[in-house]
Amino acid sequence: MTSFLGVAVAALSAAALVAGCSSSQTDTAAPTAGSTAPSSSTVAGDITVFAAASLKSTFTELGERFKTDNPGTNVTFSFAGSSDLVTQLTGGAPADVFASADEKNMTKAKDAGLVAGTPVDFASNTLTIVTPPGNPKGIKTFADLAQPDTAVVVCAPQVPCGSATKTVEQATGVTLAPVSEESAVTDVLGKIISSQADAGLVYVTDAAAAGGKVTAVPFPESSGAVNTYPIALLKDSKNTATAQKFLDLVTGPDGQKVLKAAGFAAP
């Protein structure tokens, strides 16, 4: 009897051991094909975001929110004209995310093999005329910018805001003779704020951000030159998980709310 009981206890113990091992293996096993692996919402580390100059205010705000929501992360921004950013990226500048003010410069980045996956359109923007406060020259239309006694500042043609300006010129038959062509829309705005010119062409979001420092003069022809903003991960990113989460913030409800409040339209 004693021998029989010993054998039975040993058998039960072995069965329990096998069951425990089986349960442990099930808990840690890799997901099978077609299943979804549990993903951690925790990200960490630094990322660098190259973004169009017109995104400086909104992206700075979103960067601070991102760091607050994701302790242990840090977002460094490089803001400039989209064409300049592409030049820097093709020259080997390290970055994790690229946000362009137009699709043309994003295409350049894609063609250069810099982009991972498919870019996502997240906003759009249109031009407006800005003048020093009070509109001293009394500018009312796009055609008024071509008056010989009006000093106008625009973006360079390769910059998205400059390309949009050329589109309006072609559509209206009005040819401008700018006194300066700038490499970023913020530089155009700066010259108007400092009264170095009578008028400039910037995005509606830049005019809104400047507040009373400028007077905005909308013109209907701007609707024919809308710029769509795409954002993408970059192939050489060293922190794709954190970069993707920032991209998700920009394209998600919270990011879209911030962009809308700044005057950006839906893509």
Image (cartoon, helix red, strand yellow):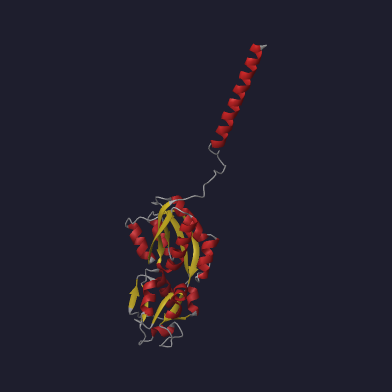
Image coordinates of residue 234 in percent, x first then y, are 41, 54
**Residue positioned 37% across, 85% down in the render:** 150
Occupied quadrant, residue 185: bottom left
Residue at horizontal 36%, vertical 73%? 187
The image shows residue 212 at horizontal and vertical percentages of 45, 80
Q: Is residue 142 above or below residue 225?
A: below
Q: Residue 20 sits in which quadrant?
A: top right
Q: In which quarter of the image is the N terminus?
A: top right
| Above or below, 26 relative to 201 | above
Residue 198: quarter of image: bottom left
Left or right: where 92 falls relative to 172: left
Q: Is residue 246 above or below residue 83?
A: above
Relative to the observer, which residue lies in front, 100 or 96? Answer: 96
Q: Where is residue 54 in the image (x, y as percent from the top left)?
A: 43, 69
Q: Can residue 173 be seen in this view?
A: no
Considering depth in this image, is 60 or 247 the residue closer to the camera?
60
Residue at 48% x, 78% y is: 221
Q: As drawn, is 231 to the left or to the right of 83?
A: right
Q: Where is residue 179 in the image (x, y as percent from the top left)?
A: 33, 80
